[in-house]
Image: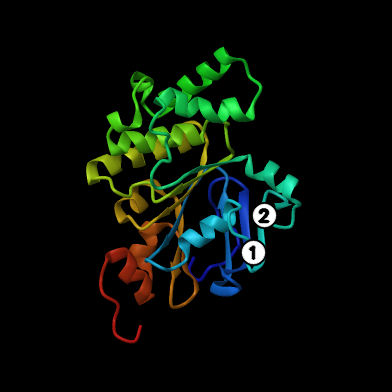
Amino acid sequence: MEAGSATAAPGKGEPIIRVIDLDTGYDGNPILTGVNFEVRRGEVFGVLGGSGSGKSTILKNMIGLLEPIRGRILFGEDDIWAADPEARQRILARFGVMYQSGALFGSMTLLENVRLPLETATALPDDAIDLIARMKLELVGLEAFTGHLPAELSGGMQKRAGIARAMALDPEILFLDEPSSGLDPITAASLDATIRRLAETVGVTFVIVTHDLASIYTATDRVILIERRARSIIAEGDPRKLRDESDDPRVRSFFRREPEPVGA
């Protein structure tokens, strides 16, 4: 389906997040207007766009870092930005976020990094925290590296450790900001496989902000494509179908990495 709409189509699960009539930007100046889409439970959902399109701004709206100018973001039936600060924090506590760098603490081992959210947000005994942290690292294939510092690992392993830490508190949805950034194609493909496996075996819902075409095709179920000049969504759906079937030259240009026709 092209031209962003919040209307549901057959797919995985019920909507877990709905973005409705969103205008967003900075200092009251919109860079995107009239944005509508939904993320369905259990899917890997991609937010795509070129540099400066506003895809990272939408991520900030969704994870509570930037209040939109207008519109609503619903998590289930809870309006994130209409909630009072205390209620908003309870909503956001059900999210996990991994930023581009993985945001690991360099002086802490992988196990200590994954333990940290459990230590600060729960009253679990130490042995339970240790067990959960080890289980999260095992989910991303890092059970043999619990005592390693981040600097002792490859970039891809650091990204996987970042996902493990983001999963520590069993979030209902995981947001990943450019997860394959800085990775070589083989390492990026391995990370994509980890994301797919977690979505299919653990049932985690992912929202991925990316421009990496290989990851788009191998990791995501559905995507939205944001276009800077249109200041909104210009396409939505299965990225493989958008690549092969779209009549919009802007969509073809993005997915096929072709120059847009003059005047498109």
Of residue 217 and residue 113, the one placed in the foreground of this image is: 113
Name, please, the residue furthest toward the right: 84
Q: Residue at horizontal 30%, vertical 32%?
A: 151
User: Does dot 2 land on a helix, a strand or a loop?
Assistant: strand
Name, please, the residue furthest toward the bottom: 263
Q: Residue at horizontal 31%, vertical 71%?
A: 253
Q: Residues within 10 Å of mark 1 (few under 14, many from 20)?
A: some
Of residue 157 and residue 199, the one placed in the foreground of this image is: 157
Q: Is 216 displayed left or right of 45 in the figure?
A: left
Q: Could you tell which of marks 2 and 1 lies nearer the N-terminus?
A: 1
**Quadrant of the rendered structure where residue 260 is?**
bottom left
Residue 42 percent coordinates (x, y): 53, 42
Taking 124 as reference, is 140 above or below it? below
Name, please, the residue furthest toward the front: 107
Q: Residue at horizontal 39%, vertical 29%?
A: 107
Task: Return the residue at label 1.
Answer: 20
Residue 29 percent coordinates (x, y): 57, 75
Residue 162 percent coordinates (x, y): 42, 36
Q: Residue at horizontal 26%, vertical 75%?
A: 259
Residue kind at label 2, given as amino acid type: Leu
Taking 54 as reference, is 231 above or below it? below
Of residue 49 and residue 250, the one placed in the foreground of this image is: 49
Residue 108 percent coordinates (x, y): 41, 27
How far apart are the alpha carbons under marks 2 and 1? 8 Å
Image quadrant in which the C terminus is located: bottom left
Q: Is 218 displayed left or right of 15 in the figure?
A: left
Task: Return the residue at label 2.
Answer: 74
Q: Residues within 10 Å of mark 2 (few under 14, many from 20)?
A: some
Whether tag 2 and tag 1 are in contact, CB under 8 A, the answer is yes
Residue kind at label 1, given as amino acid type: Ile
Taking 118 as reference, is 8 above or below it? below
